[in-house]
Image: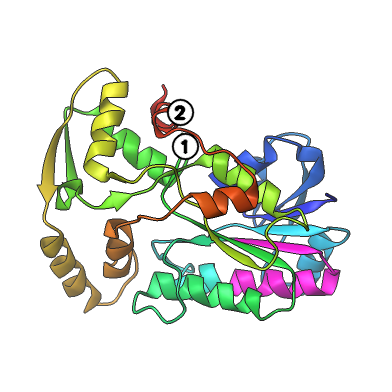
């Protein structure tokens, strides 16, 4: 495998990819603040998705690209289109100009360009752009990703460290958490030309579990029990719809539906295609909440 460009390299997923074999990667980031988060010694490039010249400089000489996720919760300047579609479109165009051999898109379980959910729709749109590009690709759809610095891991820490936790719907929805280290390993493998070409893989963890049980197991790992209280989803949805009448971004009904969707997939097809081993959920929980 030659040089691999990692977009969003300062994210938890990007930093984990860079932990092994950093000489093989070029870390692509958009700001001085993001660049400061990169490990020392790693090759880096400052990019702007609306500046083709910066994209061309970053991808010059690269054999592959790993394009990492955008946003689930919209904010100023980071709508679903701005964060999930436009960067993918720009990076695909640059990869075509650079003649890269493989493009890896880390997407989301549930991505569907025809979905009524705006988040899933944006992820599906990015996937279609890649499938139609003519590039050799692997699309890796990830579920909730757990690790010390992931959004999912930080939320698990908050819920598990206290005596009480309030969860949407009492935490009855099913998740299939993927260890951050497994995601990074899978993305590195997918960047190899011969691994899963032109495949869409649902790369989920080995065990489906309710959020409630996940928090309870994390609390026990920290040496105590946690009392779970329910936050009615219907109340939250109603409040968000009312908020939406007045415009504005932030946590939305679309994000709520993504968070509370059940995830139950067979982990074996993606595991086998990527030729990786999955971390046991108990170890992932321990890794995510370690002091």
Identify whether 214 is placed above or below 76: above
Q: Earlier in the sequence, mark 2 or mark 1?
A: 1
Q: Is residue 40 above or below residue 275?
A: above
Cβ–Cβ under 8 Å for marks 2 and 1: yes
Question: Would you identify the image quadrant in which residue 48 lies?
Answer: bottom right
* x, y percent for residue 20: 71, 35
Secondary structure under the numbered disc 1 in the rendered image: loop
Residue visible at 18% across and 24% down in the picture: 225
Q: Residue at x 61, y 69 (%)?
A: 87
Question: Could you say where residue 176 lies in the image, as x and y percent from the top left?
Answer: 38, 48
Q: Which residues are magenta?
A: 86-105
| Residue 145 higher or lower than 19, as above or below | below
Foreground of the two, 178 or 159 = 178
Using the image, tell me which numbered label, if any, was put on residue 287. 2
Reply yes or no: does residue 113 show up in magenta: no
Where is residue 194? Give x, y as percent: 77, 57
Q: Secondary structure at mark 2?
A: helix
Q: How is the image coloured?
A: rainbow
Front position in the image: 24 or 191: 191
Pinpoint residue 145: horizontal percent, then vertical percent: 45, 46
Q: Which residue is mark 1?
A: 147
Q: Provide the major secondary structure of the magenta segment.
A: helix
Seen from this angle, which residue lies furthest right? Answer: 61
> At 85% from the left edge and 51% from the top edge, which residue is drawn?
2
Classed neighbour count for the residue bearing mark 2: other residues with Cα under 10 Å, few (<14), some (14–19), many (≥20) = some
Distance of label 2 from label 1 (alpha carbons): 6 Å
- Report if residue 9 is visible in the image: no
Mark seen at residue 16: none
Confirm whether residue 74 shows in the render: yes
């Amino acid at each position: 495998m030659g040089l691999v460009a990692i977009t969003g390299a300062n994210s938890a997923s990007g930093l984990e990819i860079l932990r092994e074999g950093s000489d093989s990667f070029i870390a692509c980031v958009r700001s001085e603040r993001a660049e400061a988060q990169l490990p020392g010694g790693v090759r880096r490039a400052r990019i702007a998705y609306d500046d083709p010249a910066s994209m061309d400089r970053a991808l010059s000489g690269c054999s592959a690209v790993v394009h990492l996720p955008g946003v689930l919760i919209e904010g100023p300047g980071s709508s679903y289109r701005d964060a999930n579609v436009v960067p993918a479109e720009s990076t695909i165009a640059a990869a075509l100009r650079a003649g890269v051999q493989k493009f890896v898109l880390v997407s989301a379980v549930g991505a569907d360009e025809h979905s009524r959910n705006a988040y899933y729709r944006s992820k599906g749109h990015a996937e279609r752009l890649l499938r139609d590009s003519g590039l050799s690709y692997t699309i890796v759809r990830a579920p909730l990703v757990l690790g010390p610095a992931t959004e999912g891991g930080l939320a698990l820490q908050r819920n598990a460290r206290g005596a009480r936790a309030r969860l949407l719907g009492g935490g009855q929805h099913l998740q299939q958490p993927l260890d951050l280290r497994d995601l990074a390993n899978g993305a590195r493998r997918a960047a190899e030309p011969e691994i899963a070409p032109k495949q869409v893989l649902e790369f989920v963890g080995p065990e489906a579990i309710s959020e409630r049980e996940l928090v309870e197991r994390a609390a026990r790992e920290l040496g105590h029990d946690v009392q779970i209280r329910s936050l009615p989803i219907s109340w939250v949805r109603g409040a968000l719809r009312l908020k939406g009448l007045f415009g504005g971004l932030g946590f939305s009904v679309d994000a709520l539906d993504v968070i509370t969707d059940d995830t139950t997939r067979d982990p074996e097809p993606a595991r086998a295609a990527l030729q990786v081993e999955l971390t046991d959920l108990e170890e992932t929980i321990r890794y995510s909440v370690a002091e």
